[in-house]
Image: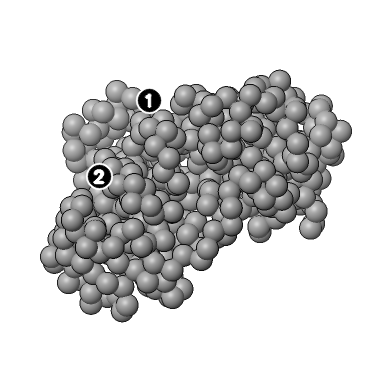
Amino acid sequence: MKVAIVGAGKLGYKIAETLFDDNYVIIIDKNERVLERVSEQLDVLTIKSNGLQTELLNELDISSCDLVIAVTNADETNMIICMIAKKLGCKNTIARIRNPEYVKQSDLIKKSMHIDHIVNPELATADEIVRYLVKGYALHTEDFALGKVSLIDFNINHFPDLIGQKIMDLKNMENILIVAISRNGEIIIPHGGVVLQKNDILYLIGKKESLDRLIKKEKICLERPYVKNVMILGGGKIGYYLANKLDTLGIQVKIIEIDKERCHYLSEQLNNPLIILGDGTDINLLEEEDISSMDAFVSVTDYDEENLLMALVAKQYGVNNIVAKISRASYSQIIERLGIDIALNPVNIATGDILKFIRGRKVAAVSLLLQGQAEVLEIIISENMNITEKPISKLNLPKGIILGSIVRDETVIIPKGDTRIYPKDRIIVFCLQSKIHALEKFLR
């Protein structure tokens, strides 16, 4: 597949990093220094130019492209690039559009400008935060197959009874599979003889009801009270989307924002949330706003270091639910040791959304784990796939790919060696990023 990416920022780089192994990728950007960094890390074609130039797009034979992805800093530029590319014959286009005013009329924009898919990292991140805050458990979960299958991850340090046990000896694991362990930043694909160690992060996939029973029986986490008061540090796009969504749920929200003009905008656009002009790193201000009485603290400024630091501060003040936005994959090991409840990366969330579109109708969901080192995919099995009606033990699944569950009609199946896959099944697959190409070959 031939893919042109306009914009070599964090999202553009991540998309290229995910796709370049199996596709012909072109990256266009006006910043020569950014392109040099891309060239040093990835085997892609880089072009220093303005993606709006029709002459350039013609020179690149954009009509031969399967996909153009516009992820510059300007929504308007992204929309126009997609429109021009489509007019010149490109098969599919994706635009990053983040402005709330445009989001309200996204269907009209897609239709009138011939954009096939719109991605909004900030809105998607706000949705994830809301889902975490309003659910009943204080740990990270994701749902697949219309809620029938769940993925959970948790730090084993909170549950010392599990430390030192072999996976094969664990109880209450019916209809549940441990698909991965993160240990000192390394991914372990476990087998029954693996011994669980201190600081391990466990990733479990299974039937939702079975995971709920495990959570309660092992006291992995207690059901928590309904979140009523939330403090948001940072009034950017994520802060805006999040406050708006929480407000509609009847949750009281305080936003601390340092920029006066942005505070005026938020106060005009949001009805009930309290907008506070000030420096969110000022401890005196946090105490004045009674941070210790908050049910949740969400740090979503533009600076990862600030988000992590203030998340720890909120933890010290006894806030039960802590969420931080991060953008750097290199911080993943730190997060595991800091005790932050959940850290979300908008780049990974948006990349998962784009990958779902690229992989077509057979892929119902894509979630990037371990800061993009692995994926969980929900795949709808079609009749022409070679894996149907054969025992799983005979499929020779490549190492690094784990079949976590099968959903057939309303039934969730945790597969064994003699389990067979049939057309119309939904399979939930854990796959290391380095094995995605092997998985795609496997499913052909």
Answer with the quarter of the image where residue 153 lies.
top right
For disc 2, the marked residue is: 306
Q: Is 188 left or right of 255, judged from the image as shown?
A: right
Q: CA distance from mark 2 to mark 1?
A: 33 Å
Answer above or below: position of 183 versus 59.
above
Q: How many marks?
A: 2
Q: Is 67 left or right of 146, judged from the image as shown?
A: left
The foreground one among 287 and 392 is 287
The crowd level at tag 1 (other Cα within 10 Å; few <14, some 14-19, many 20+) is some
For disc 1, the marked residue is: 43
In the picture, which quadrant includes the C terminus?
top right
Q: Is 358 left or right of 328, judged from the image as shown?
A: right
Q: Is residue 199 visible?
A: yes
At x 28%, y 63%, the residue is 290
Q: Residue furthest left?
A: 260
The crowd level at tag 2 (other Cα within 10 Å; few <14, some 14-19, many 20+) is some
